[in-house]
Amino acid sequence: MTGYARSPGRRPDRTVPPRGIAGLAPSAEWRRAELAVADFLFARGFAILARNLRLGPLELDVVARRESLVVVVEVRVRGPGALVGAFESIDGTKRRRLRRAVERLWRRRLAALPDIARVRIDAAAVTFSGSVTRVEYAGGIC
């Protein structure tokens, strides 16, 4: 619960909303990170097909295309004090969910397109330091 904590018979105590690594609310920070990755891909010749693509209970952060290649990118944000690095945080369970979401994307949307040769699952680690945004990119994680 954010905003208020309430006890019976007492006035609500105002609490501070959670803040993320860049000092933004976590959802704003994630959107900023996904936008940074979309910009990163666009600068490398990719067309952005979707961001936050929902496929039933599954979600893909960024989907982009360059020629016959479609990349699905898992975006991770970590702060300097994180116990696990951004790429290391993509564990076996997350990889299985990504593969399942990509299989669903293929069946529902991409298989019908004649000029798509393959789909690759990538990951991007985004860090914020003041006004500087850094994107580290790893192709073919699954």
Image (cartoon, rainbow, N blue to C red):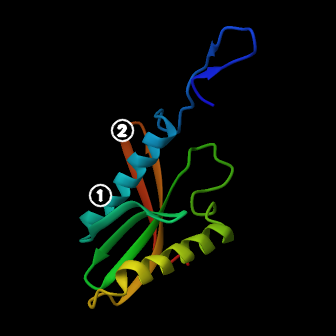
Q: Residue at x 46, y 47 (%)?
A: 30
Pointers 1 and 2 in contact (C-beta within 8 Å): no
Q: Secondary structure at mark 1?
A: helix
Q: Position of residue 8 (x, y in %)?
A: 75, 14
Q: Position of residue 127 (x, y in %)?
A: 47, 49
Q: Is residue 92 left or right of residue 111?
A: right
Q: Is residue 33 above or below residue 113?
A: above
Question: Residue 131, which numbered label?
Answer: 2
Query: In which quadrant will I find the N terminus?
Result: top right
Q: Secondary structure at mark 2?
A: loop
Q: Is residue 129 left or right of residue 65?
A: right
Q: Amino acid at mark 2?
A: Ser
Are there few (<14), some (14-19), or many (20+) residues within 10 Å of tag 1?
A: some
Q: Is residue 74 above or below residue 3?
A: below
Question: From this viewpoint, which residue is outermost toward the right?
Answer: 8
Q: Residue at x 56, y 49 (%)?
A: 78
Q: Nearer the viewer, mark 1 or mark 2?
A: 1
Q: Amino acid at mark 1?
A: Asp
Label 1, on which residue? 39
As rendered, which of 135 and 30 lies closer to the eye?
30
Q: Position of residue 18 (x, y in %)?
A: 57, 31
Q: Is residue 103 above or below residue 79?
A: below
Q: Position of residue 101 (x, y in %)?
A: 51, 73
Q: Residue at x 41, y 47 (%)?
A: 31
